[in-house]
Amino acid sequence: MSMPYQQTGNQIDYQEIKQTKADLKAEVHFIGQIVGGLDFQTDDGLFCELAIDCGDGWDLLQPGNNKGIQTQTSYANPGQLFSWGHPFDLHFSVSNLIGWPKALLKVWRLDSSNKIDACSYGTAIFPRSAGYHQVTCETWTPTGENLDLEIRKPNEDLATNTDQFSKFDRSLDWRFQALSFYMENPPRLTTLAPLTTDKGDFARRKILNSISNGKVIMEVEVVMKNFKRLSFSGQ
């Protein structure tokens, strides 16, 4: 309920105006940081990219964040914490709760020869209740073993074919494994499409062979506005 006022002489007259549900808009703030990466068995530098996947009823009020968030490169001993401490502030206007926001995470490795390569992927749904939360996202690395899976060739340029998939046959399968073992150059996805909520990508996700890798830790503070007045529930 808002309380606008008008001043007449020395008197201030307040007039109550009742707001209906149609005048209200639910909003959600996700405020926090990408704390770091843990249990990655490498002594190379690591950095993390975060992209947002959400439903059509979610409008990000800072359009610049659609381009994603990237941390700085951090170094640590194998199995220890790669500290990033990179903040984020995501403010959504919500018309329906379908497609609650999800974090699409990609961890990159920077080796001693300044070569950058994808290290692992992961997804994490943002908390659905107000307050402080710690989110741990388990990540994984594609192995390239499934002959029907469409993935990027290890040495393919990052800037090319970002929306296309490269198929490989049985004769190339052992090459991916050899490159991954000897050159530490694992296969990587051409796009994050298999990680999103699009139903058409479920088929690809089923045949995606992978091995577990480290985990990404995030801290998130969730602030909800007008959820109770609109009878919305994040649970």
Image: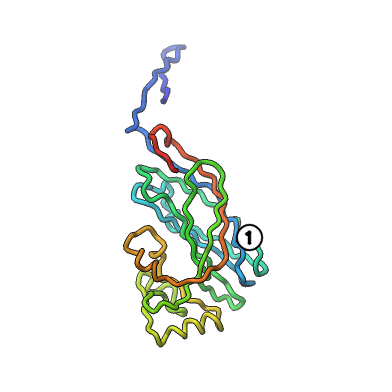
Spot occupied by residue 112 in the image (x, y as percentages of width and height): 62, 76
Q: Secondary structure beneath disc 1?
A: strand
Spot occupied by residue 79 in the image (x, y as percentages of width and height): 65, 67
Q: Quadrant of the N terminus?
A: top left
Give the residue at the far bottom of this rendering.
Answer: 171
Q: Give the vertical position of 160 relative to 83 (above or below).
A: below
The residue shown at (55%, 53%) is 135
Locate residue 151: give its quadrant.
Answer: bottom left
Q: Give the vertical position of 192 relative to 175 (above or below).
A: above
User: Closest to the observer: 71 or 213?
Assistant: 213
Q: How many marks?
A: 1
Locate residue 102: give its quadrant.
Answer: bottom left
Spot occupied by residue 185 in the image (x, y as percentages of width and height): 52, 78
Q: Which residue is mark 1?
A: 83
Q: Give the vertical position of 233 relative to 161 (above or below).
A: above
Q: Is residue 191 left or right of residue 182?
A: left
Q: Is residue 15 left or right of residue 219?
A: left
